[in-house]
Each structure stands twice: as C-alpha cells, then as structure tokens.
Amino acid sequence: MKRKRFSEDQIVKALREADGGRATKDICRELGISTATFYNWRKKYLNMDVSQLKRLKELEAENRKLKQMYADQALDIVMLKDVLSKKF
C-alpha cells in the first residue's frame, strides 16, 4: 500500500477539528488514515502551530542526515583501522 505524506497544514487542521468536537473516526475516514495514526499525531504534535511543526520536521530531517553521516564516518574509520592493522 502506498504511503501518503500529509502536509503540516493537513495534520494541524485534523487535530484542530478533533479539538473542535468533530468525531475522530470521521476525520480518519476522510483522510484515509487509521485511528492509531491520528492518535500518534495528537501525541506528537498537540499544541503546535504550522510553523512549529514545519521547524520540527526540518530538525528531524537534519538530525537523520547527521546520524547517517556519523555512521558512514564510523564505518570508514573501522575499515581504515582494519586495513592499517594488517601486516604486509
């Protein structure tokens, strides 16, 4: 099944509609998501506005890239140490 990506606006709008009294299952059906996804959004993004949510996603993406760079560097170091430790 193809994963949908929802914009920050859509996530915030869905959470605000639920706070306004709209039924969660109706919102989930409209967006095509499970209730578990909705409650995960609510737990993670409650009380955030769109700009804060965008900033959070940017920071998460940057953190993911930095972790990948660190892992690559660590593997390179291990490989170089292994090569240098062998006697020719």
Image (cartoon, helix red, strand yellow):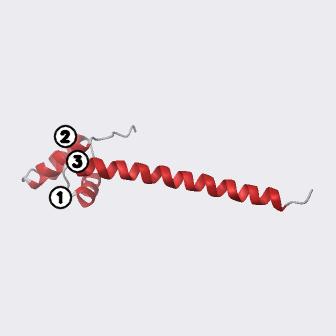
Q: CA distance from mark 1 to mark 3?
A: 12 Å
**Residue kind at label 1, given as amino acid type:** Asn
Element assignment for label 2: helix
Element assignment for label 3: helix
Residue at which label 2 appears? 30
**Residue kind at label 3, given as amino acid type:** Ser
Work out which residue is located at the far left of the displayed protein and give it: 21
Q: Residue at x 20, y 55 (%)?
A: 48
Work out which residue is located at the far top of the displayed protein and give it: 2
* Residue 52 locus on image (x, y percent): 24, 52
Q: Residue at x 13, y 50 (%)?
A: 16
The circle drawn on residue 47 is 1
Residue at which label 3 appears? 51
Image quarter where the N terminus lies is top left
- Tell whether label 3 touches label 1 (CB within 8 Å): no
* Residue 35 locus on image (x, y percent): 25, 53
Q: CA distance from mark 1 to mark 2?
A: 22 Å
Q: Residues within 10 Å of mark 1 (few under 14, many from 20)?
A: few
* Residue 31 locus on image (x, y percent): 23, 41
* Residue 58 locus on image (x, y percent): 35, 48
In the displayed structure image, the side of residue 33 where residue 72 appears, left or right: right
In the displayed structure image, the side of residue 55 where residue 19 appears, left or right: left
Q: Residues within 10 Å of mark 2 (few under 14, many from 20)?
A: few
**Residue kind at label 2, given as amino acid type:** Glu
